Structures are given as structure tokens and as C-alpha cells.
Image (cartoon, coloured by chain):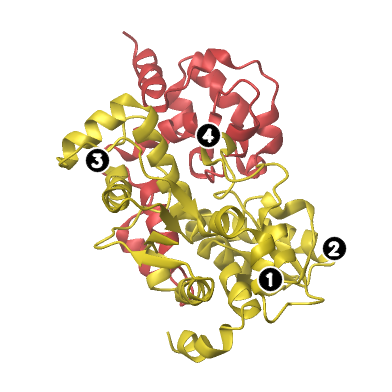
Chain colours: A red, B yellow
Amino acid sequence: MNPGKKQAEMIREISGVNPLKCMKCGKCSATCPSYNEMDIKPHQFVSYVVNEDIESLINSKSLWKCLSCFACVERCPRDVKPGKLIDAARQMVVRKKGQDYLKADEIPELLDPELPQQLLVSAFRRYRR
Amino acid sequence: MKYSYYPGCTLRTKAKALDAYARASAAALGIELVEIEDWQCCGGVYPLGSDEIATKLSSVRALNEAKVKGQSLVTMCSACHHVIKRVNDDMKNVEDIRVRANNYMELDEPYAGETEVLHFLEILRDRVGFDELKKKVTNPLTGKKIGAYYGCLLLRPGRLLNFDDPENPKIMEDFIRAIGAEPVIYPYRNECCGGYISLKEKEMSKNMCEKIMESAEGFGVEMLTTACPLCLYNLNKSTGVKLPVVYFTELLAEALGVKEEIKEEVQAL
């Protein structure tokens, strides 16, 4: 089995999403507040999984620009949930040893007196294991 | 009315005001909030992976404790509400998660989503009733033009959270009306503030919050209200248009005439 096929299966398994349901309407990208910051756009996540090009997906900037705001999930007329696909790709990265996007050592210089604990726990959950 | 209460990590630290004003208001309304014992942080974000179990257990523990007491579980924070409600839905409807979570928990009786999860705003709407709330207001916030900032976590995904219409919500506007103020609807009220992106990419959330502030100001909003400590933080970090942002519980306490008596206490927190 080629590695892309195996990785695509893993994404489908973690996300529970069937990318073949997508009808390419583009609503997810139209509604995404991070669209301008993303190199691979939300409607394209689906194609990368279908085409089993997971290497490009896990090396994309988009992985770290998704806000989990669920706008794409809410507005998808086919219930494809692009936000869950991108989270699965992110999980594939951070579940590997040493691949955390946020290191504990970085935290002190990111703090300010008003910063809520909620921000730290949320970032830790999304960016590392 | 007696409820199990889950404050959450930030209400013990940077968002003590959200908690203190909620408790004072609940007491004034005859609502008893019983804090559950030894609660643990919900994690702030719902773990999206279908294979995530351990990250959901803190929510399951809180849910089960409320179930054992036969009470509904109440939250104040949008994020806690979002996470616990979605985990509860998993425990009720996703067999794989229910079985594996219960294997970890080893409870006397398996937990299967029996507890009702309510945000305090839902208590005000569905249990107290906004008409009844209006009657209990002693200090109406007459003339104040307040914009509700919903953000994401209270509303989406609408089908799971079942909180309000995710595209055209009205619960917070109805609340604002009940306390005697004037709700102002503006286009960005359910757009994202940037959430956790503000830890590593502060510019991104600043840009998003600037749009929210400009949208609100353009429609005549004088003050924004939220249920989320992270939304409040991000909005306050916005540069450019600066509108005051307050927790909805502070407005409620003010309208019920109990804000002054705990104001010093809150400031000392």
C-alpha cells in the first residue's frame, strides 16, 4: 500500500468524515474566517484526502490557521465537515513524538497579565498531545 | 430550582467576575447553584477526533456527578458549555465512545448521556422565563445600547448544541431586552474572535476583532456583552475601535440590584 493511501485512510478514520459526499459548492471556503491565511483552502482539504495527497496537507500552513469556529461545519449542505478533516490532519502531526506545534518553553514569553487559562488549555489541546 | 454547577478553570482565575456575578444573580432569582465536587478542566476545546476518549473524561465525570444527584448541569462559560454538551451527545449517541469511556470510568452504573446540560442563559430563557426575569429587575439598564457577541462556541454546530438558531440567534437580545436595555443587532455578532489563535498569532485575532468592533460601532452599539472569557480577552486586545466588553452576568447582577454589594469583592478577586 502506498503511504498516501494509508494516511488518507487514517484521516477518514480519525475524522469520521466521508470526503466523497462533497459536491464542491465552496460554501466552506466562502465562510471561513481564516481563508486569506490559508495556503490550502477548506474546500480543497476534501480533494487532498480523495487524491490521497496527505503529505501536502500535513505540511500546509492551513493546519495551524483553522480556528475550530465550526462555520464550515454549520454551513456545509452535505454535512462533510471540512473542519474535522483538517483537525484529523493536525492530529496526525501532533501525535508523533516531537511534533508539537506549541512547546511548553514558548509559553512564558506569550503570556500577559490578562491572558485567560482557557486560551492556554485550548491551544495545548489543539497544538500538542 | 437547584442545579449542579460547573464553573470551569477560567472562572476560578481570570474570569472570577463572570462567576461571582452569576452566583449573586442566581441567588437573587432563587436559583441554587451547587458546585460539583472535584471538577476538572473541560480542556477548553472539544476533541474532534472520533478516536479521542481520554480527553473527554473530565466532562463525563462532571456529567455523571450531576446524574447521580438527579440534577441538570449548568455552565457559564461558552467553551465549557460547548465541550460538555458535545461530549454528552457522544455519550448518548456514539456507542464506541460510550463503551470505551465507561471502560475507563468503572462507574457503579454506566453513564449514557442522561444528564441535561444547560447554559445559564438557557436557564434564564427556559426555566425562569424572560418575562418573569423582567419582573424581577429592580434597576433596569434603560437607554443602554448593547450588542450581543455570541461568537462560535455557544451556537455551532447548531444541531448538536441546540442552543438557538445558529445563523440568527435571539436569546441574548431577548436577555438584553429583559434587563431593560436596548439590544442592537449587528452583522458580526456570530463571527469568530480568533479563539486560541491569539496565543501564537496575535495579529490574526486582532484583525478579526477589529472587524467585529467596527461592525458593532457602525450599528450604534455602545457596549458588547459575552459569555466567553476568551472572546472577552481577544476583543479587549483589539486595536482601533474600543467598545467596553462585559460578561452577561455583570449586566444581570446590575439589573437585579446586586452588583454594588459584591463589586468590591469582585474587584479584589
Q: Nearer the viewer, residue B215 or B121?
A: B121
- Residue B90 visible (yes or no): yes
> Given the image, what chain letter belongs to the residue carrying mark 1?
B
Q: Determine the residue positioned at 54% across, 57% down.
A: B123
Q: Could you tell me which secondary element the residue under label 2 belongs to?
A: helix
The crowding category of the residue bearing disc 4, from other C-alpha atoms within 10 Å (few below 14, some 14 to 19, many at least 20), is many
Q: Which mark is residue A97?
A: 3
Please tell me whether mark 3 or mark 4 is closer to you in this view.
Answer: 4
Name which of mark 2 and mark 1 comes first in the sequence: 1
Amino acid type for the residue under numbered disc 1 = Lys
Q: In this figure, which residue is indicated by the disc labeled 1?
A: B135
Q: Which image quadrant: the N terminus of chain B?
A: bottom left
- Label 4: which residue? A83
On screen, residue B56 above or below B181 = above
Q: Which mark is residue B218?
A: 2
Name the chain under label 2: B
Mark 3 Cα-neighbour bin, 10 Å: few <14, some 14–19, many ≥20:
few
